[in-house]
Image (tube, rainbow, N blue to C red):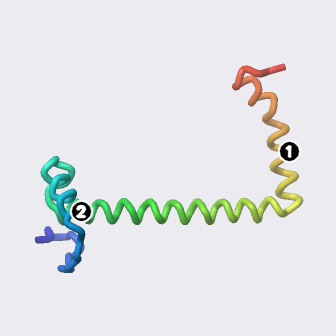
Amino acid sequence: MPSAGAPSAKKRTFYLHTDVLGAIEALVLAGCAPSQNALIEHLVRRSLGRLLREQREVELRMAYAAAMQDDQYRATQEAVERDFDALDRETWGTAV
Protein backbone atom coordinates (compact mmCIF):
# COMPACT_ATOMS: atom_id res chain seq x y z
CA MET A 1 0.00 0.00 0.00
CA PRO A 2 1.28 3.50 -0.74
CA SER A 3 2.06 5.58 2.31
CA ALA A 4 0.30 8.86 3.04
CA GLY A 5 1.73 11.60 0.86
CA ALA A 6 3.20 9.13 -1.62
CA PRO A 7 2.04 9.24 -5.23
CA SER A 8 -0.87 6.91 -5.77
CA ALA A 9 0.03 3.52 -7.14
CA LYS A 10 -1.87 1.65 -9.81
CA LYS A 11 -1.89 -2.05 -10.47
CA ARG A 12 -0.54 -3.26 -13.81
CA THR A 13 -0.03 -6.73 -15.19
CA PHE A 14 3.15 -7.53 -17.09
CA TYR A 15 4.36 -10.71 -18.68
CA LEU A 16 8.04 -11.27 -18.02
CA HIS A 17 10.38 -14.09 -18.96
CA THR A 18 10.99 -16.55 -16.15
CA ASP A 19 14.70 -15.70 -15.95
CA VAL A 20 13.79 -12.03 -15.40
CA LEU A 21 11.34 -13.00 -12.66
CA GLY A 22 14.08 -15.07 -11.06
CA ALA A 23 16.47 -12.15 -11.26
CA ILE A 24 13.92 -9.85 -9.61
CA GLU A 25 13.42 -12.32 -6.79
CA ALA A 26 17.18 -12.78 -6.37
CA LEU A 27 17.79 -9.03 -6.22
CA VAL A 28 15.11 -8.58 -3.56
CA LEU A 29 16.45 -11.54 -1.55
CA ALA A 30 19.94 -10.00 -1.81
CA GLY A 31 18.58 -6.84 -0.19
CA CYS A 32 18.74 -4.58 -3.24
CA ALA A 33 15.17 -3.48 -2.54
CA PRO A 34 12.57 -4.14 0.13
CA SER A 35 10.10 -5.60 -2.38
CA GLN A 36 9.71 -6.54 -6.01
CA ASN A 37 7.55 -3.46 -6.58
CA ALA A 38 10.18 -1.21 -5.02
CA LEU A 39 12.89 -2.78 -7.16
CA ILE A 40 10.94 -2.32 -10.39
CA GLU A 41 10.11 1.30 -9.50
CA HIS A 42 13.77 2.00 -8.70
CA LEU A 43 15.00 0.45 -11.96
CA VAL A 44 12.43 2.27 -14.08
CA ARG A 45 13.21 5.62 -12.42
CA ARG A 46 16.95 5.03 -12.87
CA SER A 47 16.46 4.17 -16.55
CA LEU A 48 14.29 7.23 -17.10
CA GLY A 49 16.86 9.44 -15.38
CA ARG A 50 19.59 8.05 -17.64
CA LEU A 51 17.46 8.64 -20.73
CA LEU A 52 16.70 12.23 -19.73
CA ARG A 53 20.40 12.92 -19.03
CA GLU A 54 21.36 11.50 -22.42
CA GLN A 55 18.72 13.66 -24.13
CA ARG A 56 20.02 16.78 -22.33
CA GLU A 57 23.57 15.94 -23.38
CA VAL A 58 22.49 15.62 -27.02
CA GLU A 59 20.68 18.96 -26.81
CA LEU A 60 23.77 20.61 -25.29
CA ARG A 61 26.05 19.14 -27.95
CA MET A 62 23.69 20.39 -30.67
CA ALA A 63 23.52 23.85 -29.09
CA TYR A 64 27.31 24.00 -28.78
CA ALA A 65 27.76 22.86 -32.38
CA ALA A 66 25.31 25.54 -33.52
CA ALA A 67 27.09 28.18 -31.45
CA MET A 68 30.44 27.21 -33.00
CA GLN A 69 28.99 28.12 -36.40
CA ASP A 70 28.80 31.74 -35.20
CA ASP A 71 32.08 33.52 -36.05
CA GLN A 72 31.93 35.91 -33.08
CA TYR A 73 31.24 33.12 -30.59
CA ARG A 74 34.03 30.98 -32.04
CA ALA A 75 36.46 33.92 -31.91
CA THR A 76 35.55 34.52 -28.26
CA GLN A 77 36.12 30.85 -27.41
CA GLU A 78 39.48 30.84 -29.19
CA ALA A 79 40.51 34.00 -27.32
CA VAL A 80 39.63 32.41 -23.99
CA GLU A 81 41.68 29.35 -24.90
CA ARG A 82 44.67 31.55 -25.80
CA ASP A 83 44.29 33.57 -22.58
CA PHE A 84 44.36 30.41 -20.46
CA ASP A 85 47.00 28.55 -22.46
CA ALA A 86 49.89 29.56 -20.18
CA LEU A 87 47.94 28.70 -17.03
CA ASP A 88 46.91 25.36 -18.51
CA ARG A 89 50.52 24.53 -19.37
CA GLU A 90 51.59 25.47 -15.83
CA THR A 91 48.86 23.29 -14.33
CA TRP A 92 49.73 20.35 -16.56
CA GLY A 93 53.43 20.79 -15.83
CA THR A 94 54.29 21.50 -19.46
CA ALA A 95 55.15 25.19 -19.12
CA VAL A 96 57.73 26.26 -21.66
Q: How many marks?
A: 2
Instruction: List the single residue furthest toward the front.
Output: 18
Q: Secondary structure at mark 2?
A: helix
The one nearer the camera, 48 or 14, is 14
Q: Is residue 53 left or right of residue 83?
A: left
Numbered label attached to residue 19: none
- Give the Cα separation between the discs numbered 1 and 2: 55 Å
Q: Residue at x 80, y 41 (%)?
A: 81
Say above or below: 60 vs 14: above
Residue at 50% in and 60% down? 53
Residue 75 versus residue 58: which sits nearer the camera? 58
Query: Which amino acid is tagged 1?
Result: Ala
Please tell me which residue lies in front, 28 or 90.
28
Q: Residue furthest left?
A: 1
Labelled pair 1, 2 in contact (Cβ < 8 Å): no
Q: Is residue 78 above or below residue 93?
A: below
Report the residue marked by disc 2. 20
Would you place residue 13 above or below residue 62 in this image?
Answer: below
Q: Quadrant of the N terminus?
A: bottom left
From the image, state whether disc 1 or disc 2 is nearer to you: 2
Secondary structure found at label 1: helix
Mark 1 vs mark 2: which is more N-terminal? 2
User: x, y (%) of residue 44?
Assistant: 33, 65
Q: Residues within 10 Å of mark 2 (few under 14, many from 20)?
A: few
> Dot 1 corresponds to which residue?
79
Badge 1 local density, few (<14 within 10 Å), some, or many (20+)? few
Residue 74 lies, in percent from the top left, at 84, 54
- Measured as percent of width and height from the top left, residue 25 is found at 15, 58
67 to the left or right of 47: right
Residue 2 left/right relative to 53: left
Up/down of 31 relative to 39, above or below: above
Q: Amino acid at mark 2?
A: Val
